[in-house]
Image (spheres, grey):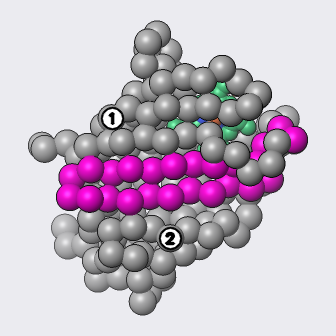
Amino acid sequence: MDLHEDCAPLAFLLGTWRGQGEGEYPTIESFTYLEEVTFGHVGKPFLAYSQKTRHAETGQPLHAETGYIRAIGEERIEFVLSQPSGIVELHGGRVAGTRLDLTLHAVHTTPAAKSVTDVVRSIEVTDDALAYTVSMAAVGEPLTHHLRAALHRDAS
Ligand code: HEM
């Protein structure tokens, strides 16, 4: 199936990526995790995104998230994300070469979720290597680094 023409600037993300990350936050124990990410398409003007992680030492499932990167023309995007922890994020932004420059529009939490009021994500690809970072303002802390990971595109 052909990639929708509006998604052409996002083609560098397509595929399945695996690797390892490190998490920290002032309120929790630091940890390392294994991650699998997939960006796919169905010929429409968005990429489907899914992510799952597990603890690097115990193998226990950790965070997961799923969403869509909407291509809205002229290399502009919208990123819609939901998490089983009761958090949804809406980002806008632009494709800059093989980097996504994202700006948070809104983050919302369900009544029973932990409080999150800001999320800053960076995503950059160099050939078959994807690096990202996530910072957040949560549980009363100001915007603070939470995650960094390095993934590699599956050859298959
Ligand atoms: C690779 C993705 C992620 C992993 C592996 C991960 C992992 C963890 C772990 C292990 C904890 C501590 C235990 C717990 O409360 O469950 C935690 C806490 C937390 N994470 Fe993440 N997380 C990820 C992404 C995110 C994202 C994207 C957000 C928000 C946008 C987020 C928000 C939080 C919050 C609010 C806490 C609670 C902190 C506290 O209670 O003091 N996490 N995360």
The reply to whether the magenta stretch includes residue 57 is no
Q: Is residue 12 left or right of residue 22?
A: left
User: Where is residue 6 drawn, in percent x and y?
Assistant: 35, 82
Cα–Cα span, label 1 and label 2: 22 Å
Residue at left 73%, top 64%? 106
Pointer 1 residue: 19
Look at 54% across and 75% down and name the residue there.
93
Q: Where is 121 relative to 146, above or below?
A: below
Q: How many marks?
A: 2
Q: Where's ligand 1: which quadrant? A: top right
Q: Amino acid at mark 1?
A: Gly
| Residue 53 in view | no
Q: Is residue 125 magenta?
A: yes
Q: Position of residue 96 (x, y in %)?
A: 40, 76
Residue 77: give x, y in percent of width and height: 49, 75
Which is nearer the eye, 3 or 152?
152
Magenta stretch: helix, strand or loop mostly: strand
In the figure, residue 47 lies in which quadrant? bottom left
| Quarter that holds the N terminus | bottom left
Q: Residues within 10 Å of mark 2 (few under 14, many from 20)?
A: some
Q: Is mark 1 within 8 Å of ligand 1?
A: no
Q: Which residues are magenta?
A: 116-140
Q: Residue 4, located in which quarter of the rendered image?
A: bottom left
Residue at the extreme bottom: 74
Q: Position of residue 78 (x, y in %)?
A: 54, 72
Disc 2 element: strand
In the rendered image, the residue lying farthest to the left is 156
Question: Dot 1: within a 10 Å radius of its alpha carbon, few (fewer than 14), some, or many (20 or more) residues?
Answer: some
- The reply, left or right, for residue 83 in relation to residue 128 is right
- At x 70%, y 46%, the residue is 144
Query: Relative to residue 16, is residue 18 depicted above or below?
Result: above
Q: Which residue is mark 2?
A: 101
